[in-house]
């Protein structure tokens, strides 16, 4: 009998993991940002030194200043305005995730952010899909398995949700698995885009909504009850509807009960929430309470470049803060796989043929 390995980053990287919430423009390699800036003539980078650039992204995102935070995306989007750049970024995204042991990932992006140099929205989507296909192939050549799907985001502050929803439906058979609304929550309630959500539901298409990150319960309630979101991007503010007694007994309000009863998945991104101030630290993050109460919790990266994280490092940080063991990490992983916008038979096959066998030797 061999001893069960400890829950360390090194071992976590080897077990199968599933990622549902990751932004393509938030997860470039620093060297790729620098090389694409050079290749495409983008002049705005704060530095071209790759090491400094990686640090700059994390520090700017960490600074507590919204202006610096948004500047990081101006640079990544700035270098992603050509088909070649989009193919490369998507291919590297798939490869990086595969190297981290992610076996299924849904990566999201807003096509409308990549048309500054004249690409059409369709050309953007096709380039990204081509990149993911290339990345999956290159990973497979190196003996790593990953399957990817994409989510098309509409930006809350723009008025193109219907158009983007139509593209998501049109490309549903070529790797686009769903839709999302991203951008600032305050002042832009999801109900502004009701037509798009109705169109998606009419077409039996899947969607999640960024809701309950910094903004409160009203945003979560609208996303679920008015818009019909199947999952919540972040959703951590659902804790505002839970009261805890001094002895730890929890009392769920009606919305928190509904979210838990209906098994509505929460796409939780711990490090990102700490960076934006939605949680004080990983140890203080509501994920501890939500997992203990058996909400459908999933663990995600949000923006790997800005947060300097991977799925494995998020798992490791949570294991440190909450004492999670292999059974807990398998639970998060199966939660995510169950919640994916992938055909049921494929989800089941990944759970039974990849995820459970990957954790089985670690569960005493
Ligand atoms: Zn996000």
Image: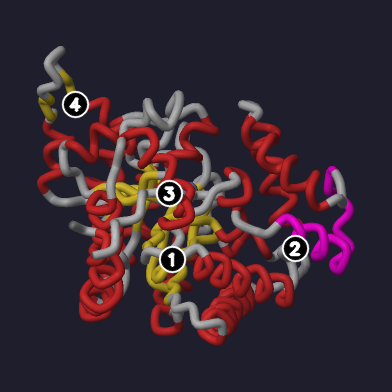
Q: Residue 192, can we see it?
A: no
Would you name the residue on which mark 1 appears?
102
**Residue marked by disc 4:** 242
Disc 3: residue Cβ within 8 A of ligand 1's nearest atom: no
Q: With 150 as the anchor, is 248 left or right in this view?
A: left
Residue beneath disc 3: 8
Q: Which-is-in-front pick, marks 3 and 2?
A: 3
Mark 4 or mark 1, whichever is nearer to me: 1
The residue under label 2 is 32
Residue 321 x, y percent position in the rendering: 37, 33
Quarter of the image containing the C terminus? bottom left
Q: Is residue 317 in sight in this rendering?
A: yes
Element class at badge 4: strand
Label 4 or label 1, whichever comes before in sequence order: 1
Asked if the magenta segment contains residue 347, the reply would be no
Q: Say few, some or many: other residues with alpha carbon within 10 Å of mark 1 (under 14 / 14 to 19 / 20 or more).
A: many
Q: Which mark is nearer the camera, 4 or 3?
A: 3
Please provide the residue range marked out in magenta.
30-46
Element carrying mark 1? strand
Query: Which image quadrant for residue 71?
Result: top right
Q: Quote the CA–CA distance across marks 3 and 2.
A: 29 Å
Neighbour tally class for label 3: few under 14, some 14-19, many 20 plus, Cα within 10 Å: some
Which residue is farthest top? 246
Residue 87 shown left or right of residue 51 in the figure: left
Image quadrant where one finds the N terminus = bottom left
């Amino acid at each position: 009998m061999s001893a069960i390995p400890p829950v360390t980053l090194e071992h976590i990287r080897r077990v199968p993991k599933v990622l549902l919430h990751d932004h393509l423009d938030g997860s470039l390699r620093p060297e790729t940002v620098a090389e694409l800036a050079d290749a495409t003539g983008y002049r705005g980078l704060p530095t071209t030194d790759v090491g400094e650039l990686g640090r700059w992204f994390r520090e700017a995102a960490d600074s507590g200043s919204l202006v610096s935070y948004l500047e990081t995306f101006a640079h990544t989007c700035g270098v992603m305005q050509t088909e070649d750049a989009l193919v490369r970024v998507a291919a590297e995204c798939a490869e990086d995730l595969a190297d981290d042991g992610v076996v299924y990932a849904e990566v999201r992006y807003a096509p409308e952010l990549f048309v500054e140099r004249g690409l059409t929205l369709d050309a953007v989507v096709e380039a990204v899909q081509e990149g993911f296909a290339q990345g999956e192939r290159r990973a497979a050549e190196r003996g790593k398995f990953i399957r990817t799907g994409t989510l098309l985001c509409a930006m809350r502050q723009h008025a193109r949700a219907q158009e983007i929803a139509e593209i998501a439906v049109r490309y549903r058979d070529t790797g686009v698995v769903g839709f999302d609304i991203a951008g600032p929550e305050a002042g832009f309630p999801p109900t502004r885009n009701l037509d798009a959500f109705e169109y998606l539901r009419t077409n039996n298409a899947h969607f999640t909504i960024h809701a309950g990150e910094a903004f409160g319960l009203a945003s979560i309630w609208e996303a679920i009850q008015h818009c019909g979101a199947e999952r919540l991007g972040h959703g951590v503010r659902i804790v505002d509807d839970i009261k805890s007694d001094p002895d730890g007994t929890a009392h769920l309000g009606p919305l928190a009960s509904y979210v838990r009863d209906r098994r509505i998945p929460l796409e939780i991104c711990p490090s990102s929430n700490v960076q934006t101030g939605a949680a004080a630290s990983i140890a203080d993050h509501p994920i501890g309470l939500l997992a203990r109460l058996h909400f459908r919790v999933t663990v995600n990266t949000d923006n790997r470049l800005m947060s300097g994280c991977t799925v494995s490092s998020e798992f490791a940080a949570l294991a440190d803060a909450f004492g999670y063991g292999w059974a807990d990490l398998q639970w998060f992983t199966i939660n995510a796989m169950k919640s994916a916008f992938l055909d049921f038979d494929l989800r089941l096959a990944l759970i039974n043929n990849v995820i459970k066998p990957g954790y089985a030797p670690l569960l005493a």
